[in-house]
Image: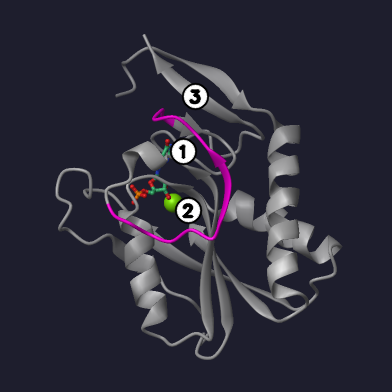
Amino acid sequence: MNAQKFEIKTLIEAVEIAETIDRMAQQIKSELGDQEVILVGVLDGGFAVLYDLSRALHRLGMDKIVIDFIGIDTYGHGTTSSKEPKITKDLKRDIRGKIVLIVEDIVDTGFSLSVLQALLLSRRPARLMTAALLSKSARREIKVPVDYIGREIEDEFVIGYGLDFDGRYRELPYIGVVKFS
Ligand code: IMP
Ligand code: MG
């Protein structure tokens, strides 16, 4: 894969990401007010969105935020859709009776999110919602509810702001498209 030549083209600048996250935070705030919310960051890619979204919510006065993480390994689902993505790190907290918001970087086929939602729903939260910065709706293979979507993107491979290509580029402050030549 690394032998292949590619360029990175900027798709979403850092300021635009910040505006998008602020807009999502306003929607979440108008729905949830100042209730306690457990934000569940989906590792590895969700760390960037989780950090910025949690601060945007705090700025809007949501000061009862609890941050937790869950790890999911999605490899293999593309070829074998029946193969369930694997949970690599579980939550630290009991979410029973709590308001839970899953925070994802991107929803692609929807398989990993649907596994995650089923798992968390089985733990009986008061409410389970999902926020994803990006969505590639054209690639969806399984119907999955996403309450807050930052931005729809085309069927292109994106990197940066948490998203990786072969483990790299997660640290980029913007989102780029990988163009293979
Ligand atoms: P899904 O199960 O197909 O929806 O996959 C979602 C996961 O695949 C995301 O949480 C990402 O970790 C990864 N993913 C999907 N599309 C991209 C992309 O364009 N760039 C980097 N990672 C991606
Ligand atoms: Mg992910």
Q: How many residues crowd mark 2 within 10 Å: few (<14), some (14–19), many (20+)?
A: some
| Disc 3 target residue | 177
Q: Position of residue 146 (x, y in %)?
A: 48, 58
Residue bounds of the magenta highlight: 142-157
| Mark 2 → mark 1, Cα distance in angstroms | 9 Å
Indicate which quadrant contains ligand 1: top left
Query: Does the residue at mark 2 contact the one at mark 1 (Cβ under 8 Å)?
Result: yes
Sequence-wise first label, 2 or 1: 2
**Magenta stretch holds residue 145:** yes
Q: Is residue 179 above or below residue 71?
A: above
Report the number of discs.
3
The CB of the residue at mark 2 lies under 8 Å from ligand 2: yes
Sequence-wise first label, 1 or 3: 1
Question: What amino acid type should be assigned to the residue bearing mark 3?
Answer: Val
Please state if 165 lies on the left or on the right of 142 as rendered: right
Sequence-wise first label, 3 or 2: 2
Residue under the image location 75 percent in, 58 percent down: 26
| Disc 2 target residue | 44
Query: Does the residue at mark 1 contact the one at mark 3 (Cβ under 8 Å)?
Result: no
Q: Position of residue 118 (x, y in %)?
A: 34, 73
Q: How many residues crowd mark 3 within 10 Å: few (<14), some (14–19), many (20+)?
A: some
Please state if 66 lies on the left or on the right of 88 as rendered: right
Residue under the image location 52 percent in, 85 percent down: 95
